[in-house]
Image (cartoon, helix red, strand yellow):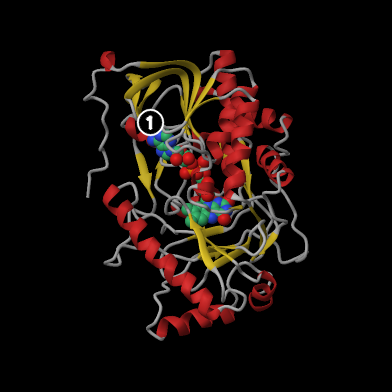
Amino acid sequence: MLSDDYAIQGVLNEAAIPSLGQFDVIVAGGGAAGVSAATNIARKGHRVLMIERYGFCGGGAVAGMSGTICGLYLSSDRNANRAEQVVFGFADEFRKRLIARGGLTEPQRYGKTWTVTHDPHMWRENADDFLSDTGVNILYHSRVVGVLRDGDTVRGVIVDTKSGLAKIEAKLVVDASGDADVVHRAGWATTKGQDGTIQNPTMIFRLGNVDVDTYLEYWGENTISPEHVIEALIEAENSGNYHLPRKKIWIFPTSRPNEIMVNATRILGRDGRDLDVTDPVDHTEAEIVARHQVREYARFLKDKVPGCVDSYVVDTGVEVGIRQTRSIVGVKRLTNQDVVGRHKHADGVVRCPWPIELHSGQKPKVEWLLDDYYEIPFGTLIPEIGENIIVAGRCLAAEHEALASARVTAQCFGYGHAAAVAADIALRDGVALRDIRGEDVRDILNREGAALD
Ligand SMILES: Cc1cc2nc3c(=O)[nH]c(=O)nc-3n(C[C@H](O)[C@H](O)[C@H](O)COP(=O)(O)OP(=O)(O)OC[C@H]3O[C@@H](n4cnc5c(N)ncnc54)[C@H](O)[C@@H]3O)c2cc1C
């Protein structure tokens, strides 16, 4: 195992590193949170650079092929046939533009709530359009590997590119890396899951040439595996012919004909240990184990599930899907009690109706928040230490189970929007990010369509 402080600052001579320029704001990472943050900051007239290690946006939603926009709709035992949307703002804008380009399904039942399945390729195009339309500067294929800082004040980042290292300066940095890479590389504290154990990764895959009507007749409308499928999975596993460690699995018909998207694998190390994907050795093992497991589930579906007999694996995520890595130590922390108690906060900047969907142990635990939602306070985005830096996305300060709810895509769009509003206030009024009142951010988010009140 590599040590957790495998960082490079402190060993570099900054003066010797070429500069790639100066910006008002750097957004590190182009997942849902980063795309939202960069777009919304640029809309306010600031010069923004978004840095992304891949050649496309989407992060967990696209490279990890998480596949659906969760967190838009209420969970309920009532109104079983209607999806009630309670989250709006940038998530809704993104949703509508995906629909316009044919890249999103109608709401699909997921247990007691609903979700919508997106086309990962169109997600990328959608993100490119949002960023280009608002004049965001984009640097793909560049990874943030260090932080320029004077004491606790951030003044830019160091990126690793094909041409070597480069430095980029900015008045503010948004850490939207999902992994809190900027905070970590600055040397500030982060936490990881439950005493260091994080949720299991999953390699998602798409299956083509499926007779979806026949499949639906067998499976039913609910995307979570029904009892008879769970029994079939157990029977197949017990036969000794298949390795299917997870029995509660999700399958979503996609926006393309004859195709389903399968969220089924549960990735542990070959010796059965939980993997920590911030460790490159564990991360590598996760990818290899995952590809084997994809084949096993694809074989099971082909052999045992009606409609899938002529199916084939279209693709997997570009990488194994990572639900959780580092969370920052924030000015505030979203607690498990905040989530199960559906707590609302005067400084709540994002609303979340998504259940606790915890992937650890033998089967995923889903705890519904029926007919209600909770709010995430602004201070969860502000690191306890560090000036001119704010986080957006799944690396916010949250307890383990709380994060298993608050990490989903609609909310990540919301964190990005909240970070953008705060960045604008900080730049416009010359205030430190940590001195901004969450109540003021909430007011502006409301004026910009977030519909929090
Ligand atoms: C298997 C799985 C299934 C899921 N299912 C769903 C689902 O069905 N619906 C749903 O809504 N959510 C789902 N989620 C959760 C959701 O996909 C993520 O939590 C969400 O996408 C996180 O968004 P983010 O912007 O915070 O981070 P990420 O999506 O992780 O984005 C971070 C971005 O930063 C980039 N990056 C990272 N480090 C650096 C660096 N040092 N320099 C430059 N770039 C960097 C990454 O490449 C990435 O693009 C799932 C997640 C997983 C793993």
Q: Residue at x 47, y 71 (%)?
A: 297
The answer to whether residue 336 is seen in the rendering is no
Tell whether circle 1 marks a residue whose Cβ is less than 8 angstroms from ligand 1.
yes
Nearer to me, 2 or 341: 2
Is residue 19 placed above or below 367 in the rendered structure?
Answer: above
What is the total number of numbered labels drawn onto the structure image? 1
Q: Position of residue 316 (x, y in %)?
A: 48, 57
Dot 1: element: strand
Instruction: Tell whether 412 sits left or right of 53.
Output: right
Q: Position of residue 432 (x, y in %)?
A: 50, 19
Is the C terminus in the top left, top right, bottom left or bottom right quadrant?
A: top right
Q: Residue at x 48, y 70 (%)?
A: 298
Nearer to me, 81 or 17: 17
Q: Amino acid at mark 1?
A: Val
The residue carrying mark 1 is 144
Q: Residue at x 66, y 65 (%)?
A: 112
Instruction: Tell whether 216 sits left or right of 290.
Output: right
Image quadrant assignment for residue 110? bottom right
